Image (spheres, rainbow, N blue to C red):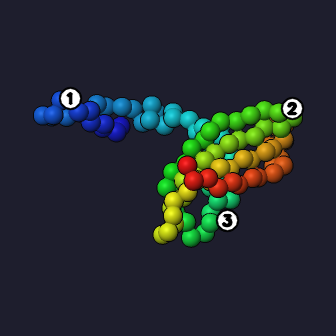
Amino acid sequence: MKKVYVMLGLLFAVPLHIPEMVLAQQETPAYAKWGKMAVEEVKGKYPHAKIVDYLHEGKEVHGASTIEKFKLWLKQPDKEFGVHVRISYLTSTQEVEKIELQESQS
């Protein structure tokens, strides 16, 4: 059993006992597979940049296809910028149709 401390005011912390099962029940988001793919694509295109932030912007369903949308924020020695990633796949088979990357300054 893990102990989690909750701050009550500024003077002391009270330990709460939370069973391991409760902590383990946090589910992996449905988009995790696509997020990993987005990160790998960005790392491949910008191998010297550091990814400093990640945002799942949602998904769109268009007929038999789904588009997962992400924005990653990258930092290089000379600049910081965002990269929008759009992964289009067949909803029924999850076969990737195309991956688009587009830089943005905001």
Earlier along the polypeptide chain: callout 3 or callout 2? 3
Q: Amino acid at mark 3?
A: Lys
> Which residue carries the number 2 mark?
63
Q: Amino acid at mark 2?
A: Gly
Q: Secondary structure at mark 1?
A: strand
Circles 1 and 3 in contact, beta carbons < 8 Å: no
**Separation of disc 3 and disc 2 at Cα?**
30 Å
Against 51, residue 25 (above or below) is above
Against 63, residue 40 (above or below) is below
Residue 61 x %, y %: 78, 32
Q: State left or right for residue 69 relative to residue 72.
A: right
Which residue is pictured at 51% across the width and 35% down the height? Answer: 26
> Which residue carries the number 3 mark?
45
Which residue is pictured at 48% across the width and 69% down the height? Answer: 77
Mark 2: give few (<14), some (14-19) or many (20+) Cα within 10 Å.
few
Outermost residue on the front side: it is: 105
Say how many tags the image has.
Answer: 3
Residue 90 x %, y %: 84, 41
Q: Amino acid at mark 1?
A: Leu
Mark 1: give few (<14), some (14-19) or many (20+) Cα within 10 Å.
few
> Which residue carries the number 1 mark?
8
Circles 1 and 2 in contact, beta carbons < 8 Å: no
Earlier along the polypeptide chain: callout 1 or callout 3? 1
Q: In this rendering, does residue 36 appear at all?
A: no
Earlier along the polypeptide chain: callout 1 or callout 2? 1
Mark 3: give few (<14), some (14-19) or many (20+) Cα within 10 Å.
few
Residue 93 x %, y %: 84, 41
Q: Secondary structure at mark 2?
A: loop
Q: Secondary structure at mark 3?
A: helix
Q: Nearer the viewer, residue 76 or 34?
A: 76
Which residue is pictured at 31% across the width and 36% down the height? Answer: 4
